[in-house]
Structures are given as structure tokens and as C-alpha cells.
Image (tube, helix red, strand yellow):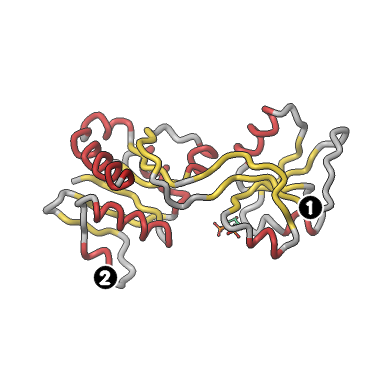
Amino acid sequence: MLNVALPKGRLGEKVYDMFEKAGFECPSIKENNRKLIFENEEVGVRYFWVKPSDVAIYVERGAADIGVAGKDILLEYEPEIYELLDLDLGKCRMAVAAKSDFRDNPQKTLRVATKFTNIAQQYYLSKGRDIDIIHLNGSIEIAPILDLSDVIVDIVETGTTLKENNLEVFETIVPISARLIANKSSYKFKSEQINKIKDEISSLLEA
Ligand code: PRP
């Protein structure tokens, strides 16, 4: 049985559809209930829904053999996993945003509010810019408005959240999308099954 961690939510449904089209269906997953684990012994697959930001933990520790996680999470936590495939889903970007009248003063430490402290730290380190990181858990857009920070580092998809809070993108750090990932030892011991899924999905993406 191959254990597959799927990100719960809108992205997860698209991801499951992809697995289904690739031949790894599990019809019970579409039943409207609050169950979190579903399996189809016939095709040898067991799916479970986890919080999107937790998928990499399940895969890194081997509770899941494979899973689907956002590149943002992989860059932020740097889990010891294999990244197998870009699924071209959940596309967005990691960006620096601020109030439109913001002008960076290089003489001053830049105050950066974010959920993604590692990504932000590495980005500004590469630019040699001194920063003060303010770790927040959500509603990051409020920080510059209340002068808690100068800028934010956050995910921008449509740009609506920024626009509605009178913020704009100043720099794009990196494009983000969903990735198929695998546990390192599972990839060794269940390589045939994992590569089959990877190849099937890969040809779906090419079609
Ligand atoms: C992300 C991000 C922004 C929003 C951007 O939050 O933090 O708030 O999406 O999307 P937009 O550009 O289409 O407006 P998400 O919905 O993932 O939830 P979160 O608050 O848990 O981060």
C-alpha cells in the first residue's frame, strides 16, 4: 500500500483529480463526510488529507510515502525529501509588498513581517540587506498598514488581497507551485510504484 498525503482544501481536490486520472482512483474519497483516510486496496493506494503546510512533515518522516506540497513550504522548511515533479497547480509567487508610498532607506534596518521567515532571511541575506524579522501567523497584510513593519514577504496569487489593503508588490522573490514529493527511503523501496505515479502524472501534464 502506498501512503499519499494530500493537502486538504481546494488545491487538494485538484491534486486528487490528477491522481485519479493517472489511474490511482479511490472513489470513497468523494463521499461527503469528515473522514480523513481513504484507501483502495485494488490499486494499492491510501490517501489522507492533511493541512497543506503539514504534508512535507508526513513525507519527511515516512508516515506518507509521497505527497503534494507547495514550493513555499519546501523552501521555508527545507525538509529532507525528494522533489519529483512540478504539478503546475496552485501557481502563485512569493513577493515583497508594501504601501505604495514606501521608499526603502538603505541606512535603516528594514522591518519585514512574514510567515516565511527562512525565505525572507535568505532573500535579504543574498542582497546583503539588514532586516528585522517579525514572524506573524496570518493577516500579514495588516502589518505595514499599522506600521508594525515596512514590508511584508507573502504569497501573492491574484493580487486581490494586496489591492484591497492598498499594498503593492515591490519585488518577486520566487514563483511557487505544487510539487510531488517523496520520502527518501520509500523512493528506494517502493520506487516502482512511485515512479509509475510520477510517470503517469507527468504524461498527463504533457498532454
Ligand atoms: C494567502 C496570502 C494572501 C493571499 C493572497 O493566504 O497570505 O493573504 O493568499 O492571495 P491573492 O493574491 O489571490 O489575494 P491564504 O489564503 O493562503 O491563507 P493564510 O492566511 O492562511 O496564509
Q: Which residue is mark 1?
A: 148
Q: Nearer the viewer, residue 98 or 44?
A: 98
Q: Distance from label 1 to label 2 (Cα)?
A: 45 Å
Percent coordinates x, y for residue 172 in the rendering: 64, 42
Q: Nearer the viewer, residue 189 or 62?
A: 189
Give the vertical position of 60 relative to 101 (above or below). above
Quarter-wise, where is residue 58 in the image? top left
Q: Residues within 10 Å of mark 1 (few under 14, many from 20)?
A: few
Q: Residue at x 26, y 70 (%)?
A: 31
Tell me which numbered mark, 1 or 2, is placed earlier along the sequence. Answer: 2
Relative to 62, 122 lies left or right: right
Q: Nearer the viewer, residue 39 or 206?
A: 206
Q: Which residue is mark 2?
A: 31
Q: Which mark is residue 62?
A: none
Outermost front residue: 207
Quarter-wise, where is residue 200 in the image? top left
Percent coordinates x, y for residue 25 in the rendering: 21, 56
Relative to 8, 145 lies left or right: right
Q: Residues within 10 Å of mark 2 (few under 14, many from 20)?
A: few
Q: Residue at x 30, y 58 (%)?
A: 17
